Image (cartoon, helix red, strand yellow):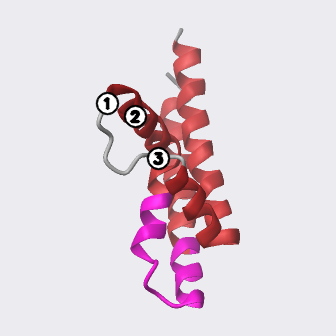
């Protein structure tokens, strides 16, 4: 059971990392697809569940993308690359901590 939980955590970490890469490569297109997959103001349980799972899988990279939208193209790419690199470092540390359990 513990192995399954660790695999789920690894998959969520990997999905966040992959979305950072996608966001770096195709920026605004990835942001639009994320926004199409979520509900702006969820009014029922189904919409809230959809938003929860979407945020848990892609949320951190999307949040960084939203914060740098008003920057110019080069600065936006540099900030996303730095945040993605920091995320990879944190991900490696988390995996090193979780793996011995």
Q: Which residue is mark 1?
A: 44
Q: Could you tell me if the residues under marks 2 and 1 are in contact, i.e. CB atoms within 8 Å? A: yes
Residue at 52% over, 91% down: 72
Sequence order check: which comes first, mark 2 or mark 3? Answer: 3
Q: Which residue is mark 2?
A: 47
Residues under labels 3 and 1: Cα distance?
13 Å
Query: Please, what secondary structure does the residue beneath circle 3 have?
Result: loop
Q: Is residue 88 above or below residue 43?
A: below
Q: Is residue 30 left or right of residue 82?
A: right
Q: Position of residue 89 (x, y in %)?
A: 54, 57
Q: Which residue is mark 3?
A: 38
Q: Position of residue 99 (x, y in %)?
A: 56, 29
Query: Looking at the rendered structure, which numbered label has been put on residue 22?
Result: none
Residues under labels 2 and 3: Cα distance?
8 Å
Query: Please, what secondary structure does the residue beneath circle 2 have?
Result: helix
Q: Is residue 38 above or below residue 68?
A: above
Residue at 55% over, 42% down: 13
Sequence order check: which comes first, mark 3 or mark 1? Answer: 3
Q: Main secondary structure of the magenta part?
A: helix
Residue span colored magenta:
62-81
Q: Position of residue 7 (x, y in %)?
A: 60, 25
Residues under labels 2 and 1: Cα distance?
6 Å
Between 31 and 76, the residue placed more toward the observer is 31
Q: Position of residue 84 (x, y in %)?
A: 56, 64
Q: Nearer the viewer, mark 3 or mark 1?
A: 1
Between 82 and 34, the residue placed more toward the observer is 34
Q: Is residue 72 magenta?
A: yes
- Disc 3 packing (10 Å; few <14; some 14–19; many ≥20): some
């Amino acid at each position: 059971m513990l192995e399954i939980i660790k695999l789920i955590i690894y998959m969520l970490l990997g999905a966040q990392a992959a979305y950072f890469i996608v966001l770096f490569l195709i920026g605004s297109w990835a942001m639009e697809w994320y926004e199409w997959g979520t509900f702006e103001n969820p009014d029922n349980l189904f919409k809230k569940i959809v938003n929860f799972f979407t945020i848990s899988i892609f949320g951190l990279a999307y949040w960084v993308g939203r914060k740098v939208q008003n920057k110019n193209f080069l600065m936006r790419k540099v900030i996303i690359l730095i945040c993605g690199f920091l995320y990879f470092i944190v991900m490696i540390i988390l995996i090193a901590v979780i793996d011995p359990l």
